[in-house]
Image: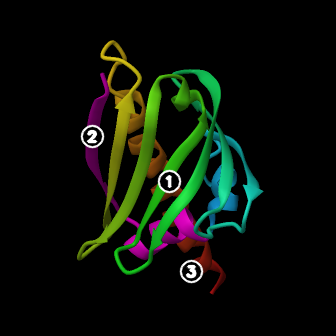
Amino acid sequence: MPVFGRLETEVAAKAPAYKFHEVNSKRIHETAKICPKYFQKIDLKEGEWGGEGSVTCWYFVIDGKAVMSKEILEKVDNENQSVTYNVIGGVLKETYQSFKFIVQAIPKDEGSLVRWTLIYEKLNVDIPDPNAMLQFGIDVTAEIDAYLIQEELEKKTIA
């Protein structure tokens, strides 16, 4: 019997929403540089970086384990500054029939709010909710935010 679920969280960030969206859409190839604590590398398998339909393998560390997730970039919504990734292989497919990540950057007066939505179908009722993946999203958001703030400071120093 399928067990569907949805988890969401919102993370306050100092960097502007458009910068977050840029990292999640146009700068995917830089993710290992931006978040070296979490990502070992990202390989493009099909398509173009940041293009809808592109397939990437994400090599990352979660709960102290090095794992891989093969994902298709299903949708890039520049108007709402969101991206949707559909997991098609790797560690998450071992316990979930389907798994999607939606990451949306929402502008605020100062900074942004980064909303992570995980939509999934467990292989069986005994599979735990993917709370570790949600925490991973929170941690990655903090690291991206720190990188983007530092990047902006360096630009101002040079100028």
Q: Give, as a three-letter code, the residue at label 2.
A: Arg
Residue 14 sits inside the magenta stretch: yes
On screen, residue 30 versus residue 91, left or right, reads right
Q: Give, as a three-letter code, the residue at label 1.
A: Tyr
> Quarter-wise, where is residue 130 in the image?
top left
Q: Neighbour class for label 2 at 10 Å: few (<14), some, many (≥20)?
A: few
Q: Position of residue 20 (x, y in %)?
A: 46, 66
* Callout 3 secondary element: helix
Give whichever of discs 2 and 1 has the lower sequence position. 2
Mark sitting on residue 6: 2
Q: Which residue sits at x=30%, y=16%?
A: 125
- Residue placed under numbered mark 1 in the picture: 85
Give whichever of discs 3 and 2 has the lower sequence position. 2
Mark sitting on residue 156: 3
Q: Give, as a three-letter code, the residue at label 3.
A: Lys
Q: Which residue sits at x=56%, y=80%?
A: 156
Region rendered in magenta: 1-26
Residue 77 sits inside the magenta stretch: no
On screen, residue 88 versus residue 29, left or right, reads left
Tell me if I can see residue 121 in this picture. Answer: yes
* Callout 2 secondary element: strand
Q: Which residue sits at x=40%, y=57%?
A: 103
